[in-house]
Amino acid sequence: MSMLNTLAVAGGGIGGLATALALGQTGVRLNVYEQADAFTETGAGIGLGPNAMRVLDQWGLSSELRSTGCIPEYLQSRRADDGRIAGRLPMGQSYIEKYGAPYLTVHRADLHQILLEAVKKQAVTELFLNHTLMAIDVRSQDIDLKFQEINESHQTMALVGADGLHSRVRTSILGADEPVSSGHWAYRALLPMHSLPQTIQESHIGIWMGKRLHVVHYPVRGGEFLNIVVLVETTGHQSQAGWDVLRSTEQINADLKQVLQGCCNELQALINRVENWRAWCLFDRPPLQRATQMARGRVALLGDAAHPMLPYLAQGAGMAIEDAACLAVQWQRIDLPVEQRFLNYAQARWQRVSRVQQRARRNGTIFHADGWLRLARDTALALGGSYMIDLPWLYAG
Ligand SMILES: Cc1cc2nc3c(=O)[nH]c(=O)nc-3n(C[C@H](O)[C@H](O)[C@H](O)COP(=O)(O)OP(=O)(O)OC[C@H]3O[C@@H](n4cnc5c(N)ncnc54)[C@H](O)[C@@H]3O)c2cc1C
């Protein structure tokens, strides 16, 4: 199938759909190839900073996002061992005034669905399920795409790899380089909000910081559920990145019981309410060092395919959304060759994304600190050190 006037996107996750929406809104013909047999998102909640929300607002998704998401009033950090409040940062209206958009918490399936519905309304976008991209042949005039178990080959003028952490598109342009296992695990769950203590039900993001672990919770689905994530450093069990299908709920509960031994009763009681956890092994890559790690010729990378990061700044999806907006702007330079447009996109993006990747790693060290670093952190938070969490270079950038 020859589609030389179209752009191809590999991957229909948040990054791929954001790309389809951003480019589609400027009239670009685009095909999205997703390996799964349905467009879905696994996982629970996601936090979207004002930087990502401003983009989503511009794409016309404000009302849908606000009706299913939540705008927490404040962020409260507490010590996991004794429950003491370390600091409180106003968010809600104060973020809207400061950054022109709220900090929003949303179920990731809801965000994905909102993007999907918007993309489906675009006549210029075609969506292909069950299309696992296997090989890419970059020729002088086009790029030939080959799919697993499908006797079709598609030609496209340019390709965007939004195919996630183990991106095949990335391997084809940068060579094989494995993502880095952090040895950290995320245990995620949803709890019905009505059953929880009033202090937890308040509209806020809660962060509990302990030795080699932290816990984050916030409301999703209009406040109907609490999204809760326990993030721990372990040295034992390793896995591929992704849901750990090998461990039973009993094993996960036993792991968590051990890890949370030194935590206060209030936190343990909250954690013990969860019956079904899902465990996720966390991977990232070293921060980007140059633009050519995001684009080569007529192939560009976007989202986790380009710059996977630890979730400790809650910006992986946010950066994918920003990437998509930037790519759409650069793609409109039709006076330039495709190669130059992609390179301009990469040049505009790599330094910011690299800084976010670095900061995400650093946040892990700060959140999980012990000894003098923990003392410094708690002192800074007690003195109103909101600069540790409220980052104008990120949210206003
Ligand atoms: C525990 C945790 C918490 C997080 N919290 C936040 C948060 O609060 N805020 C935030 O902004 N980010 C957060 N993130 C990060 C965020 O989830 C990711 O950065 C984001 O989902 C990446 O989107 P993506 O589209 O680039 O990749 P993916 O979501 O991985 O999507 C890739 C898509 O490509 C498809 N695919 C893969 N290979 C192929 C192929 N060969 N052919 C065709 N299709 C293919 C996959 O099926 C998938 O649909 C968190 C991540 C984790 C693990």
Image (cartoon, rainbow, N blue to C red):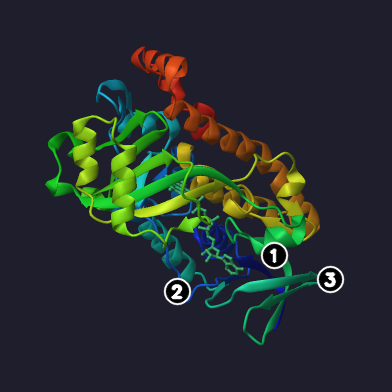
Taking the spot 79% from the left edge, 52% from the top edge, the residue there is 340
Residue tagged by mark 1? 159
| Outermost residue, right side | 140
Image quarter of residue 82: top left
Q: CA distance from mark 1 to mark 3?
A: 12 Å
> Does residue 52 show up?
yes
Sequence-earlier tag: 2 or 3: 2
Q: Is mark 2 within 8 Å of ligand 1?
A: no
> Does residue 335 show up?
no
Q: Which mark is residue 38?
A: 2
Mark 2, Cα crowd under 10 Å, few <14 / some 14-19 / many 20+, is few
CB atoms at circles 1 and 3 under 8 Å apart? no
Amino acid type of the residue tagged 1 in the rendering: Leu
Amino acid type of the residue tagged 3 in the rendering: Arg
Q: Position of residue 165 (x, y in %)?
A: 58, 55
CB atoms at circles 1 and 2 under 8 Å apart? no
Residue tagged by mark 3? 139
- For label 2, the SS is loop
Q: Position of residue 188 (x, y in %)?
A: 35, 50
Q: Quadrant of the C terminus?
A: top right
Which one is closest to the eye, mark 1 or mark 2? 2
